[in-house]
Image: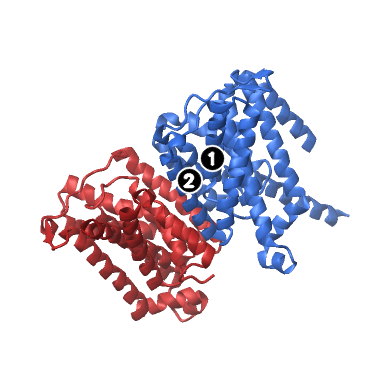
């Protein structure tokens, strides 16, 4: 069942760019990677960062600057990941000194510093951002200016990113993160250096967010202030929450829904933000587990019920 | 000298808004276990209502000073009843996320109707002009803002520390179940506290309207700085929150003289230093 679903999803992803506008799909993939990276921190390690736009934006700007120098998309993405990760080391290092909602406030405030820097530093182009970034040619073979090849390139990137996250979550490292999320004091008393694990999760998440930002720059030919704005941080939280925090596929589903809605409802202008806010409130009040999380819980309940029935009959 | 004095004055004005807002946030956090992301939105709403009252109904500044907080406070009561009361048992994070969504909704409504450009709001006749001190010109309105916020902060502190209502509030922070057992209606108390704190934010908004331009963005602009103030001060002590708010405004004003480019960032730098030195904040409990 699981493998069938996965094969179907892959087949759909392969056929999609020939049925739907590929640039739109690429946007979905970039945000799906971003949300999955965010989810590693929020869903699996229990840390709510409200500054993830800083890492995404950092990756976007670094990729744009690197492409201006030597147009190699792979190099640009590596740079974007390193940039995001380094920034994650600094912001995360400060933020993990507090917990819970304080951590959220600290990341929001520090991300605001990054926004100010992007606004005022000479290299980032101020209000205009960096426009006209080339997509380049992958290893001198594949021309990424073609939207379909760009889509497949980002698809591979996304799959690789999700594989990394999946591996991290299922590794001993991931189990320690889980332990910290459930009961930090106990994890400390068991001898784990909690701060080290938290920082590592933070840096990993930030680096992957940077890669997502870099991919966005390559696909859309620009890095802009909106990438580092707190609004973007809010959006990635919404995607994760709506799809299901702490599930592997939830954030990607959330990204698909939010990006689709944002594009479909663009004609409503200002009301898109209103709808996003309302969805936020509805998610928190009505289904905190998100769509995938609620479905999994439903399946779990059904399985438990069936098992009880079977035990009753036996 | 005069530049220094006037920048410090502006800094103190910013500081009084930081103090008023973080004070309300501290009360809400202490009682409801929620960091109220919508606090900035309510502050903006207060300023905007003052502008709307004047623009469409010809109501004066003095009327707005009473009506705006009242109206916003009532909205706050509804928000607490319908939303926050359901989140009480959950992790803080959910209250923060829900109020973030609320802030998005409020801001987008005002952006839809009034755009993002700033609306000028004139100070009332009685508070125009200024005193010509030897070393600087002191506009009366600015003096009034600092005086009014100092009185409001002190009043809130007295209300919490010295009155019967305040003693119920403080007791409800320590042990809500026991206070409930003594026959105090704790849920109603919490609703009331939220409404009053949010009303205080609206009052700060009305005070701010003649100083800054009235725009839908003014809430989200100030709220990030207020969060930094809250992290620096910690939410353990009401008086500590007030002092931190004014002090950071003062430092901001000082930075504007010494290194103008850094004025936007200095609060965040202070936050980073405080986090490195005493992670719990200056007046905080871990």
Relative side of A303 to B111, left or right: right
The colour one sees for chain A in the rendered image is: blue
The number of callouts visible is 2
Residue B94 percent location from the top left of the image:
53, 56
Q: Front-most of A273 and B251? A: B251
Relative side of A176 to A129, left or right: right
The disc placed on residue A114 is 2
The colour one sees for chain B in the rendered image is: red
Q: CA distance from mark 2 to mark 1?
A: 8 Å
- The residue drawn where x is 46% and y is 48% is A113
Element under label 1? helix
Compared to residue B276, the image places residue A29 above or below, namely above
Badge 2: how crowded within 10 Å, few (<14), some, or many (20+)?
many
Residue A40 percent location from the top left of the image:
65, 48
- The residue drawn where x is 33% and y is 48% is B218
Element under label 2? helix
Q: Which residue is mark 1?
A: A58
């Amino acid at each position: 069942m699981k493998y069938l679903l996965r094969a179907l999803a892959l087949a759909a992803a392969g056929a999609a760019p020939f049925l739907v506008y590929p640039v739109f799909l690429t946007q979905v993939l970039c945000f799906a990677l971003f949300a999955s990276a965010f989810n590693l921190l929020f869903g699996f390690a229990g840390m709510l960062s409200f500054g993830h736009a800083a890492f995404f934006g950092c990756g976007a700007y670094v990729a744009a600057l690197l492409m201006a120098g030597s147009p190699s998309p792979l190099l640009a993405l590596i740079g974007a990941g390193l940039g995001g990760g380094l920034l994650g080391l600094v912001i995360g290092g400060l933020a993990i000194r507090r917990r819970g909602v304080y951590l959220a406030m600290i990341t929001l405030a520090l991300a605001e510093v990054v926004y100010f820097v992007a606004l005022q530093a000479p290299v980032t182009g101020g209000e205009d951002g960096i426009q006209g970034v080339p997509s380049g040619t992958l290893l001198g073979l594949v021309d990424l200016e073609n939207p379909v090849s760009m889509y497949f390139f980002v698809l591979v990137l996304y799959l690789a990113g999700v594989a990394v996250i999946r591996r991290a979550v299922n590794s001993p490292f991931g189990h320690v993160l889980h332990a910290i999320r459930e009961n930090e004091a106990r994890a400390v008393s068991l001898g784990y250096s909690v701060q080290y694990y938290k920082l590592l999760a933070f840096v990993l998440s930030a680096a992957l967010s940077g890669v997502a930002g870099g991919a966005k720059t390559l696909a859309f030919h620009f890095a802009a202030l909106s990438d580092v704005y707190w609004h973007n941080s809010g959006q990635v939280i919404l995607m994760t929450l709506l799809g299901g925090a702490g599930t592997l596929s939830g954030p990607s589903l959330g990204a698909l829904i939010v990006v689709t809605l944002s594009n479909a409802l663009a004609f409503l202008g200002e009301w898109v933000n209103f709808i996003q806010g309302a969805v936020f409130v509805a998610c928190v009040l009505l289904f905190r587990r998100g769509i995938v999380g609620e479905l999994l819980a439903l399946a779990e309940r059904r399985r438990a019920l069936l098992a009880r029935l079977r035990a009753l009959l036996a | 000298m005069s530049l220094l004095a006037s920048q410090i004055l502006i800094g103190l004005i910013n500081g009084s808004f930081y103090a008023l807002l973080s004070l309300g946030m501290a009360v809400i956090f202490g009682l409801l276990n929620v960091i109220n992301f919508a606090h900035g939105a309510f502050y903006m709403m207060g300023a905007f209502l003052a502008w709307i009252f004047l623009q469409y109904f010809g109501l004066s500044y003095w009327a707005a000073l009473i009506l705006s907080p009242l109206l916003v406070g009532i909205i706050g009561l509804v928000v607490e009843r319908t939303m926050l009361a359901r989140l009480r048992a959950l992790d803080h994070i959910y209250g923060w996320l829900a109020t973030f969504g609320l802030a998005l909704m409020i801001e987008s409504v005002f952006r839809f109707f009034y755009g993002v450009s700033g609306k000028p709001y004139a100070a009332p006749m009685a508070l125009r002009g200024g005193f010509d001190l030897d070393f600087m010109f002191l506009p009366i309105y600015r003096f009034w803002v600092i005086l009014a916020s100092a009185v409001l902060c002190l009043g809130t502190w007295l209300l919490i520390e010295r009155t019967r209502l305040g003693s119920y509030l403080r007791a409800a922070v320590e042990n809500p179940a026991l206070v409930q057992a003594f026959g105090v209606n704790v849920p109603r108390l919490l609703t009331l506290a939220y409404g009053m704190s949010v009303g205080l934010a609206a009052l700060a908004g009305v005070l701010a309207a003649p100083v800054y331009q009235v725009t839908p963005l003014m809430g989200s602009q100030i709220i990030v700085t207020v969060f930094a103030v809250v992290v620096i001060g910690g939410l353990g002590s009401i008086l500590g929150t007030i002092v931190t708010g004014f002090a950071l405004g003062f430092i901001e004003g000082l930075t504007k003289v010494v290194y103008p480019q850094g004025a936007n960032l200095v609060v965040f730098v202070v936050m980073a230093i405080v986090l490195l030195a005493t992670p719990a904040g200056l007046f905080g409990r871990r």
